[in-house]
Amino acid sequence: MQTLSKPSSIVIVSGRSGSGKTSALNILEDFGYYVIDNLPLSLLTDAVSRLTAENSIAKIALGVDARVPGADLSQFPQVHESLVQAYGEHAVKVLYVTANESVLVARFGATRRVHPLMMTGVAGNLPKAIHSEIARLEPIAELADIKIDTSTINTHELKEIIRTQLGVDTIVTVNLLSFGFKYGSPIDADFVFDVRILPNPHWHTDLRVQTGEDLAVQAFFAQYPEVDAMADDIADFLNKWLPQFINNNRHHVTIAIGCTGGKHRSVYISRAVADKLTLPESFKISTKHREKRFWRD
């Protein structure tokens, strides 16, 4: 009999409209959670079961709000208890965001959005909709493990609070991308390094069809101290400055390293830089070669 894995974290996100529920879900998605928003409460338990059993998803965030029928939300304690019984109290958390009424009114005015309960006809004006929503959400608010008042904080501060409360490690993916300038510079790169000043194996007939991943080309580069010096300088720069991306709430950084054709120098330097990086454990390094499809030309 196959043993099904259990999710390590299930976060049910709810809160008052305009207080930042969508922002909280986006933040959790950045943290690697599989996010489903506006999920009817009656489908919540089944959704977790299917995501776990059929897809082995370990981190799940589910948005539930007042747009579902009020009677449905009244069943939240039972649904919550069923999840706790199935996956453990440590794995199930309820995150509830709120804000002062004056702040909510100002936010709806600034965005010119209509409160969801006004759209459904439950309330005719914004103050009544805000008060009605409080009552509807009470079954969820009472069971909240994490309550965050967003009245005076921005998105970056919200992200840090959620990260701290859930004990989430911030992971930054560093993509080292080799490319050829003759095919165009990558438009999504955060840093671009030009290594065309280095010796070029292309002018050696026996090396032309090979790449920076082949031993013969690597032996060629080993003859020139400036090649490793270039890799050292790039790695030193990245080792010093990339950790600052955590403080800037960045999760993906692309380092593009280019030569003429993206086959020899940029490929070799990308690999060499990856080997020389000594970044914190919160950084995940990957190396990709954009022009690989042209390598045998």
Image: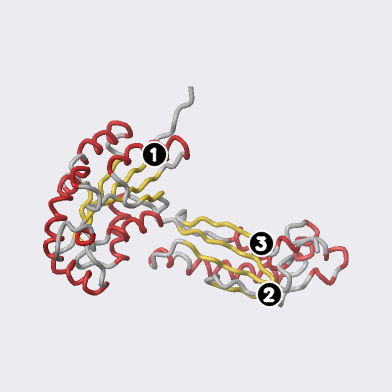
Alpha-carbon distance for marks 3 and 2? 13 Å
* The residue positioned farthest toward the front in the image shown: 121
16 and 156: which one is in front? 16
Q: Position of residue 46 (x, y in %)?
A: 35, 37
Which class describes the residues within 10 Å of circle 3: few (<14), some (14-19), or many (20+)? some
Q: Which amino acid does label 2 sit on?
A: Phe
* The residue positioned farthest toward the top in the image shown: 1
- Identified at 80% across, 68% down, the residue is 201
Q: Pointer 2: what residue?
A: 181
Sequence-first tag of 3 and 2: 2
- Identified at 33% across, 55% down, the residue is 163
Q: What residue type is labelled 3?
A: His
* Label disc, if present, on residue 218 of the rendered structure: none
Sequence-first tag of 1 and 2: 1
Alpha-carbon distance for marks 1 and 2? 44 Å
Q: Position of residue 72 (x, y in %)?
A: 22, 43
- Identified at 24% across, 74% down, the residue is 110
Above or below, 22 relative to 34: below
For the residues bearing labels 1 and 3, Cβ distance under 8 angstroms: no
Which class describes the residues within 10 Å of circle 1: few (<14), some (14-19), or many (20+)? many
260 and 212: which one is in front? 260
Q: Pointer 1: what residue?
A: 7
Sequence-first tag of 1 and 3: 1
Q: Where is the C terminus found, in terms of image quarters? A: bottom right
Q: Pointer 3: what residue?
A: 289
**Is 71 positioned to the left or the right of 242 in the image?**
left
